[in-house]
Amino acid sequence: MKKIQDFRVKEYRWLNETGYLLTLYSDLKIEPVLPGNFAEIQVPGTPEVFLRRPISVFDADYENRSITFYIKVAGKGTKKLGELNQGTIVNIIYPLGNSFTVNGSKNVLVVGGGSGIAPFVLLADELKKKNIKTTFLFGARTKKEIVLTREFGRLGKVWVTTEDGSLGEQGLVTQHTVFKDILTFDKIYSCGSDPMMKAVAKIAGENRIDCEVSLENMMACGIGACLCCVTETTSGNKCVCTDGPVFNSKELAWQI
Amino acid sequence: MADLTVKIKDLVLKNPVTTASGTFGFGEEFADFIDLNLLGGIFVKGLTLKPREGNDYPRMAETASGMLNAVGLQNKGIGYFISDIYPRIKDLDTEIIPNVNGSTIEEYVEVAEKLNEVEGINAIELNISCPNVKEGGMAFGVSCPSAIAVTDAIRKVYDKTLIVKLTPNVTDITEIAKGVEVAGADAVSLVNTFLAMAIDSKTRKPVLSTVTGGLSGPAIKPIALRMVWQVYHAVKIPVIGIGGIMNATDAIEFMLAGATAIQVGTANFIDPQVSVKIIEGIEAYCKEHNISSVSELTGALENR
């Protein structure tokens, strides 16, 4: 069930100049969160930030009643969320949206671009529970933007590409050599920029591999009321907040 | 405890707090957060004769103390509402008030005719103020003759309470209000959103796919409040106040300016429980000020 709940800032872990992990804790029990779910976070103390910010849940710790978000500074809201004092009250609405489907695969490829790695810890935990072999491929412009590879390394093999070649293979994510063996994978999950996900979905389609992508459209309500965050699908406009954020790439009306 | 009921012609609301069309879905979206039965009414998402996909993404832009939207009346059509959605919400102990739209007078009339037959629906809101559709919508609400024509046509086929939702994008909103009153409106609700625009200086492009959209939120509240006050003094029918109401104090200000009831809109996106908090706040205000009936507040603005 969706819930509106006050949390408090527990800690920050800055990963680079603009990316951080924000951990919030609550006195109350926390709701079960599925891989791909997100929260609408109210940015405290900023009248200039009017709407909540939809952010993927990075991790949840039910025992310690804490929830962690991987946030990249993109504007006023995400900047302010990185500047709160410990103990500041942060109100969130969660868990929102659908989740990645995890079933029947044997060997999956998880492709993340930039902050698109956010939902993949919860996903990889679930894949591990089901003994599904997981390979990660993360891409960014440069080395500094590649983060958390050690954490993901515990959950599967991690490959990296950077556009400037400062870490891993040089080039775009979809140019990585892992795609030479693409047919060894039976499922692809992807989250990142639209062009990257489209490129990944194209390869998946050409090789008839099932592919799920998580979209990051701008939202107002996050609960399917305002119809602002729609994406075009094969069956009309659908809300990314309630019908998504995860879509099978075949459902999307992407010209690829 | 104060009597919170208010009357809009034959429509009785258990309290003056309702939710604005387009900001509250069909109510169900908020069932996890509040008891919907507590609300005075729910103005459900705008309906058209045929299904509409709405405008392309992006349809939303955050602005200072508000937001723009350009949804464009995405809905599955009046038929689907009556057959599939209404049965799920009809047993709620609150007034379900459909918001009626059309590209032509004939379309408006056909939607209203269908709703006239639905038992349990005691009122409709005629939307002649949507700024986000190419045909119809606000085009009807910006001139007196067309506002009168569509209201008059609907009045002929709709027997129950008819509320007309007005646009603020006019030179003199009182002229339109007086026009629809003469044409048979039982009440007016105002204001819909203000035609507005947002630009991304980095890309040099408009933020919205439609270039312009409708501004809502606290940014418009003082203008909306002024318009409600003006219209209250210009017409005899009840006025429903809308425009950037974020809390009970805002709601009470609208009532003092002349509103019989109010609609909470954009605030629902920020706090899905805000409508119920506003009811509680109005109740507390009445207690504190020894008000026995909330309707005493309507137009109770005193001279400076």
Image (cartoon, rainbow, N blue to C red):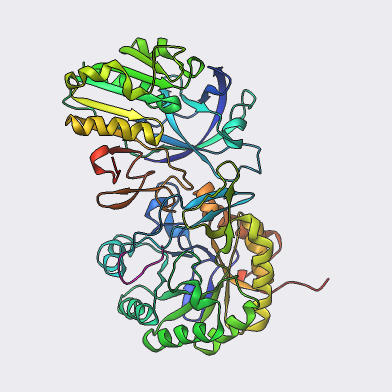
Q: Nearer the viewer, residue A177 or A213?
A: A177
Residue nearer the viewer, B220 or A85: B220
Q: Nearer the viewer, residue A185 or A240?
A: A185
Residue found at x 58% / y 35%: A75
The image shows residue B301 at horizontal and vertical percentages of 73, 71
> Which residue is farthest right?
B304
In the picture, which quadrant includes the C terminus of chain B? bottom right
Does the magenta run of residues contain B224?
Answer: no
Inspect the magenta stretch and tell me whether residue B50 lies in it.
yes
Name the residue located 47 percent from the left edge and 59 percent from the top edge: B38
Looking at the picture, how far across and down is residue B14, in whole percent? 49, 67
Q: How many marks?
A: 0
Position of the N terminus of chain B, as image quadrant, is: bottom right
Is any part of residue B286 visible from this angle?
no
* Res B198 seen here: yes
Image quarter of residue A37: top left
Which residue is painted at 37% across and 73% down in the image? B121
**Which residue is found at the position 67% from the left and 65% from the top?**
B223
Q: Quadrant of residue A170?
A: top left
Residue B51 lies left or right of residue B104; in this view the side is left
Magenta stretch, overall SS: loop
- What's drawn in magenta, residue-wise? B44-51
Q: Check the image and report above or below for A255 versus B122.
A: above
Q: Position of residue B277 (x, y in %)?
A: 56, 52
Instruction: Pick the residue in front: B144 or B29.
Output: B144
